Image (cartoon, rainbow, N blue to C red):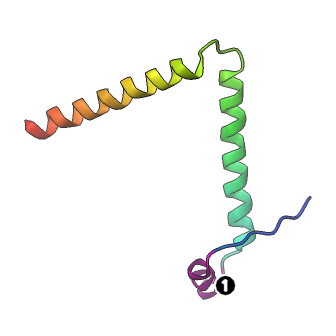
Amino acid sequence: MPNITLSVPEEIHTIMKQHGEIRWSEVARRAISDYAKKLALLDALTKNSELTEEDIMELDEKVKRGIYNHYRRKQSS
């Protein structure tokens, strides 16, 4: 299995040192694995898509607008 080296901010490193019982390499390995699997799924789902980036941005705005309106209506009720 290949090895990688990670850099973390000093404040995170301090917290990590306070919790030496945690196998931080395993935490990182799982996080990277989960993220990579999500990317693979996204690639598989979009492989045959004919949507353009412009289409996606338009859809993104419609979804955000819909969510905003939903919660705005809920708040005014």
Q: In which quarter of the image is the N terminus?
A: bottom right
What's the magenta bit mostly, secondary-structure-wise?
helix
Kind of residue sitting beneath label 1: Gly
Count of numbered tags:
1
Specify whether 12 is left or right of 31: left
Task: Classify 39 as above or below 25.
Answer: above
Residue at x-position 84% and y-position 64%? 4
Q: In which quarter of the image is residue 49?
A: top right
Local packing at callout 1 (Cα closer than 10 Å; few below 14, some 14-19, many 20+) is few
In the picture as drawn, the residue positioned furthest to the top comes out as 50
Q: Quadrant of residue 41?
A: top right
Q: In which quarter of the image is the C terminus?
A: top left
In the picture as drawn, the residue positioned furthest to the right comes out as 1
Whole-percent x and y of residue 57?
49, 26
Task: Classify 9 as above or below 70.
Answer: below
Whole-percent x and y of residue 53?
58, 23
Residue 22: say if magenta: no
Q: Mark 1 points at which residue?
A: 20
In the picture as drawn, the residue positioned furthest to the front comes out as 54
Residue at x-position 27% and y-position 34%? 68
Local SS, label 1 = loop
Specify whether 25 is left or right of 20: right
Residue at x-position 67% and y-position 47%? 35
Task: Classify 5 as above or below 57.
Answer: below
* 26 and 7: which is toward the camera: 7
Whole-percent x and y of residue 56?
52, 23
Task: Classify 32 as above or below 48.
Answer: below
Whole-percent x and y of residue 10?
61, 82
* 20 and 3: which is toward the camera: 3
What are the residue bounds of the magenta stretch? 9-21
Residue at x-position 36% and y-position 32%? 64
Q: Quadrant of residue 43?
A: top right
